[in-house]
Image (spheres, grey):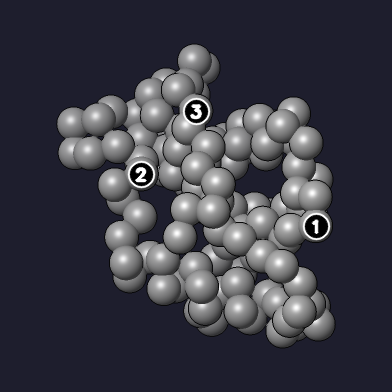
Amino acid sequence: MIKTGILGSRAEKLAAKFLKAKGLTLTETNYRCKAGEIDLVMKHHDYLVFVEVRHRKSMQFGGALESIDARKQAKLRRAAEHYLIKHKLTNAPARFDILCVNGELKKPDLQWIQNAF
């Protein structure tokens, strides 16, 4: 059985490739601070996009989207604030996107939700 961290990394690479094909530019991966982690930081037109990638192999306990609750959203907001301050981008327009990777990574069902929260 493959460890969760390895699967997560593969899902993030798949997500980055998918989003690049949609016209986004990758800025940073796995930005970490005390507040939390942002999987992908990308640019889309004039926006800085903070992307949360969620993978669920099975829908048995809910899909990837259902796993992003209010607590997780708050952590992402705090981490994004840290990123913006650290990079002196406090006036930059920004948004939060979610890229859900459902099913097997070899043939996943991808769902991109822009401006998710």
Which residue is labeled 1 in the image?
Answer: 46
User: Quick check: 45 left or right of 68?
Assistant: right
Residue 1 can be seen, yes or no? no
Which residue is labeled 3 in the image?
Answer: 110
Which of the two discs, 1 and 2, labels the residue nearer the N terminus? 1
- Name the spot of residue 8 as percent of width and height, x first: 50, 42
Give, as a three-letter code, the residue at label 2: Leu
Q: Which mark is residue 65?
A: 2
Camera-near label (1 vs 3) is: 1
In three-dimensional space, the C-alpha distance between marks 1 and 3, rounded to whole angstroms, equals 24 Å
The image quadrant of residue 31 is bottom right
- Name the spot of residue 60 as percent of width and height, x first: 18, 31
State the residue lying farthest toward the top.
Answer: 107
Camera-near label (1 vs 2) is: 1
In the image, residue 13 sits, relative to residue 42, either above or below, namely above
- Asked which secondary structure carries label 2, the reply is helix
- Name the spot of residue 74 as percent of width and height, x first: 41, 73
- Asked which secondary structure carries label 3, the reply is strand
Residue 40 can be seen, yes or no? yes
Q: Quadrant of the C terminus?
A: bottom left
Q: Which residue appears at 40% of the width and 29% of the height?
A: 102
User: Quick check: 106 left or right of 27?
Assistant: left
Give, as a three-letter code, the residue at label 1: Asp
Q: Which mark is residue 115?
A: none
